[in-house]
Image: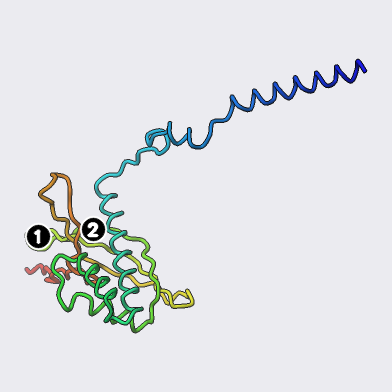
Amino acid sequence: MKRINNFLIFTLMLLALASCSKNKTEASDLDKLRNSNNTKSYPAVQMDSMQAVNTITKQKVQELLDLSTLYLSGNRNTEIDTVIYSQMESYFHKPDTLTFKKLFRELDSLKVKTVKVNNLNVYKEFYKLDTLDYAKFNVEYFDNKNRSLGIFEKNAQYILLSTAKAKKEFKFYFLDFYSAPLKKDSTSVVVTK
C-alpha cells in the first residue's frame, strides 16, 4: 500500500512538472503574429534601377499577354470583354485601333490559350538624338491542352514617364508591342585612294 501511494504521488508530481514546462515553452500563433514585424520576418531586397525596370517590364509583358489570351477566349462583345480591352489599352501610352492587331492575329492563328514570358532583357537603342527603350524576350505559347506551340523571340518598346506626385516615381507604358527594333543605317564606309 505504501508503494502504491508513493507511486501515485510520484506520478502526480511528474504530471504537474510536465504541464508546467509545456506552458512556458510555446507561444501561440496569435502571439507570434502580434509581436512580429516585417523587418524580422522578411529581409529587405535591394535592387538597382536596371533590375527594377527589368522586373517591372517582365511583369507588364506577362500581364498584357495574359489579358490578350483572356480577351480572345471570350466573345469580344460582352461587357467583361470591353473591360479587359480597356485594361489592355491602359498599358499603352497612345493606343489606337492598330495597337493589338498584330498580337491578336498571331495569338488567333496559333490558337494560343496561355503564354509564358522568359529571358526578358531591357536595352537602349540610340536613334539620332533620341534614346529608345526596348525589351527583348522569349514567349512560349501553349494550346488548350497545355502543349507547347513554340518559343518565339519578341521585342517591345516602352517608356517610363515621370509622375508629378513624386520625383522618383514613374509610370510604365508600352509604345509598341511585338515591334522590330530600329534598323541601323547600313551605309558602308569605303576607303578610296
Indicate the position of residue 164 as horizontal and vertical percent values.
10, 49
Viewer-proximal residue among 84 and 14: 14
Q: Judge left or right: residue 171 versus residue 5.
A: left
Viewer-proximal residue among 34 and 61: 34
As drawn, the label of residue 123 is: 2
Residue that appears at 17% across and 70% down? 183
The picture quadrant where one finds residue 123 is bottom left
Say which amino acid is labelled 2.
Tyr
Indicate the position of residue 90 as horizontal and vertical percent values.
20, 65
Above or below, 21 relative to 122: above
Whole-angstrom CA distance, mark 2 to mark 1, is 14 Å
Indicate the position of residue 20 as horizontal and vertical percent values.
65, 23
- Where's the C terminus, which quadrant? bottom left
As drawn, the label of residue 96 is: none
Q: Are marks 2 and 1 in contact (CB under 8 Å)?
A: no
* Mark closest to the chain's N terminus, 2 or 1: 2
Indicate the position of residue 14 as horizontal and vertical percent values.
75, 22
Residue that appears at 15% across and 68% down? 184
Give the farthest residue toward the right.
1
Viewer-proximal residue among 150 and 17: 17
The picture quadrant where one finds residue 42 is top left
Say which amino acid is labelled 1.
Asp
As drawn, the label of residue 130 is: 1
Binning the other alpha carbons within 10 Å of mark 1 as few (below 14), some (14 to 19) or many (20 upward) gives: few
Binning the other alpha carbons within 10 Å of mark 2 as few (below 14), some (14 to 19) or many (20 upward) gives: few
SS class, disc 2: strand
Above or below, 179 relative to 38: below
Above or below, 98 relative to 43: below
